Image (spheres, rainbow, N blue to C red):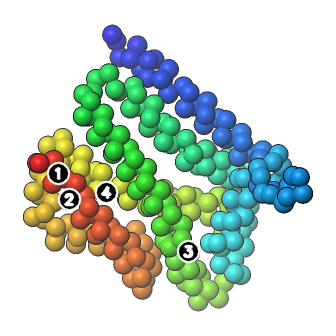
Amino acid sequence: MTLFQEFKIFIKNIASWFYAFIGFSVFFSFFGLHRVIIYGKNLILPTPSADSFSIQVFKMIKRDFLPSGVQLIVTDPWSGFITQLEIVATLAFLMTFPFLLYKIIKYLSPALFEHEKRAIFKSVVMFTILFMLGCIFAYYFMIPLTFKFMYPFASSLGVTTFFSLDIFMAWVMAILITTGVIFLLPIFMFVLSYLRIVDSIFWRKKWRFSLLCLLIFSAIITPDQTGVTMLLLFIPLAVLYMLGSLLANRVNK
């Protein structure tokens, strides 16, 4: 079987995920949560509306992150449309991500032993949980503090603060996804030890150096001059490193 034929089989396997992604994208574009009365009961249900999920999510992001006195501006006619597409695509991907992993595992399953299938399934579950935890942590802690500590620099100069819509959403999405990926540290450590690229003993012996690197990394990607957001990111990373070390240690056993 040629590489092209194998690629066609892979695409055929994940085609159902692509259809699900498109379906959720359409749903988030044209439906929104609204109050409806059914048999005298006031319920909140998704209904067709111009005030769709994408717009409602943007309003929530703007309310939670944009500091008072700061205005969003649109610098080109496409900014509003592109922003809604970004939100729709992100929501649809998050909703269908577990299904995508399932389809990929199903594609690989003929080449795997039974114990390998179980191990991959457990890794996928942990992968999904850690990524979601990272996104939640970024939304409620990292992003609000980042904007809170960055805007005083402009205010101290006595200038009027504006933020373009596309840059604002790019910052939010970048921090959200980056933090989600960072929270996958234990999975990366386990996979490196499982593939014998890094010995599991290395994680235990070099924990001081590794924690120092994580501290420096936290200081680089967090713009807070007080060090609050740096510590806020470093503490869960240190815990995740310990968890990854424990998982990697199971490779030897």
Disc 4 crowd rating (10 Å Cα; few below 14, some 14-19, many 20+) is many
* SS state under label 4: helix
Residue 214 relative to residue 63: left or right: left
Number of marks? 4
Q: Earlier in the sequence, mark 3 or mark 4?
A: 3
Disc 2 crowd rating (10 Å Cα; few below 14, some 14-19, many 20+) is some
* SS state under label 2: helix
Q: Which residue is mark 3?
A: 144
Q: Are dots 2 and 1 in contact, CB under 8 Å?
A: yes
Q: Position of residue 102 (x, y in %)?
A: 44, 35
**Residue 102 versus residue 82 in the image, above or below:** above
Asked if residue 34 shows in the view, the reply is: yes
Q: Amino acid at mark 3?
A: Pro
Q: Amino acid at mark 4?
A: Leu
* SS state under label 3: helix
- In the image, 90 versus 164, the foreground residue is 90
Discs 2/4, front: 2
Q: Amino acid at mark 1?
A: Arg
Quarter of the picture containing the N terminus is: top left
Residue 154 relative to residue 115: left or right: right
- In the image, 119 versus 4, the foreground residue is 119
Cα separation, mark 2 vs mark 1, equals 7 Å
Q: Residue at x 45, y 17 (%)?
A: 8
Discs 2/3, front: 2
**Residue 204 versus residue 145 in the image, above or below:** above
Q: Which residue is mark 4?
A: 185
Q: Which residue is mark 2?
A: 246
**Residue 8 versus residue 103 in the image, above or below:** above
* SS state under label 1: helix
Mark number displayed over residue 250 = 1
Q: Amino acid at mark 2?
A: Leu
- In the image, 174 versus 53, the foreground residue is 53
